[in-house]
Amino acid sequence: MSGKIHIFPAWEANPYLNMLYLGARSEGWRVEGSKGVDALAAALPGLARGDVFHIHWTGPVLNPGSSHAEAAVALDRFAGILEQLTAAGVKVIWTVHNTLAHNAPHPDLEVRLAQLLAARADRIIQLNANTREAVSEFYDLPIEKIVTLPHASYAGIYAEPPTRREARATLRIPQSARVVGFIGQIRGYKGIPTLLQAVERASKEVDELTLVLAGKTTAEDVALIDRALPAGVPIFRHYAFISDADIATWFAACDVMVFPYERVLNSGSVLLSATFGRPCVLPAEPHLVAEFGGQPWVSFYEVGDLQADSLARSIAEALAHSDELQASAEAFASKYTTRDMAWEYVAIIDELVRASAHEGEIL
């Protein structure tokens, strides 16, 4: 039994979305989607009992850039759409990627949106098994609705990476350098100032310490970075989108990845690190420690007033053992792949459709 799966927002270039629905597509599900609320509203007449509406990121719902009053109207409109979906017998799935949308201008409305989704969703997918506790400061996730579907690694999705020597030759990074990398969208909430401070301090202990910053960013964040550049540390900067064809080269050129995220619930970048055999350093947030604390290739630094010092120590330690940690990262990536995630997702939606069919019989 299969019908339609409507994804929101449907970002075609997002590798996670493409990976997640591979099994459903092979089973005959028609996977479609919309990027904005207007397109979602227009799609409503084509959705019926036996179909699934799957919302991932909530950012587009409240119309970024709108006033508080306009965002409140947008929230009411979205609530109406959820009511229509439920009335039509469409099953609603919400994957909790973030505690709240990043850089949300109206946090109170984001909380109300999360509460609405928690109430209306038939299933709530958590990537991290500690999500319910991590978001509890803002909203409650009904435990009976939660299913855990971890983010798969990217093993088999990207081409085999070049060797470190080949990657550094391509990017013109010295072969003898000890390279710390941050690769991905560069945003203020991702802790870049802390990383820059920590690298400068770690450079006093690590010879030839070099920093790689690569990813799409904004003029405002570039200005923030430029004001905080570490003295005496070579930095290779690439402030642009990194294509799927090039991302393996950037990771392969690094010895250790650092992701000093602030208030981040999940991160695909950590899975990329594992896929390309690169150890990484993360903040010691309880939900991240619970998920990755037993992994040799993941180390942590303490958050708080002295976090730059703690991160500097963790960087130095990770660099000292980076080569020997490569195998454990690759082993982690091989244990849970796209195939595993895609078929577990099929099991979730099949269960929902069977429940929907029984409801139709009762009615």
Image (spheres, rainbow, N blue to C red):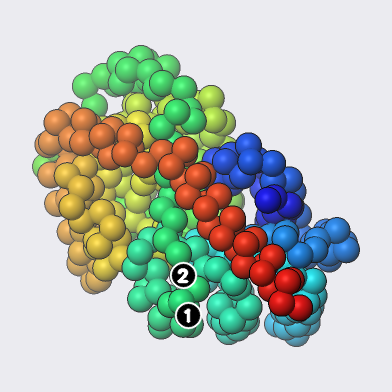
Q: Position of residue 102 (x, y in %)?
A: 53, 65
Q: Secondary structure at mark 2?
A: strand
In this rendering, does residue 36 appear at all? Answer: yes
Q: Is residue 121 left or right of residue 327?
A: right
Residue at position x 21%, y 30% from top? Answer: 327
* Circle 1 Cα neighbour tier, 10 Å, few/some/many (<14 / 14–19 / ≥20): few
Q: Position of residue 108 (x, y in %)?
A: 58, 84
Say if 250 sits above or below 310 in the image: above
Q: Quickly name the residue at label 1.
A: 142
Q: Secondary structure at mark 1?
A: loop
- In terms of depth relative to the viewer, which is nearer, 26 or 185? 26
Say if 172 sits above or below 241 in the image: above
Q: Using the image, tell me which numbered label, if any, was put on residue 88.
A: none
Q: Is residue 351 left or right of residue 141?
A: right
Residue at position x 66%, y 69% from top? Answer: 358
User: Hey, what amino acid is under mark 1?
Assistant: Pro
Q: Position of residue 272 (x, y in %)?
A: 40, 39
Query: In which image quadrant can residue 301 be found?
Result: bottom left
Q: Quickly name the residue at label 2.
A: 146
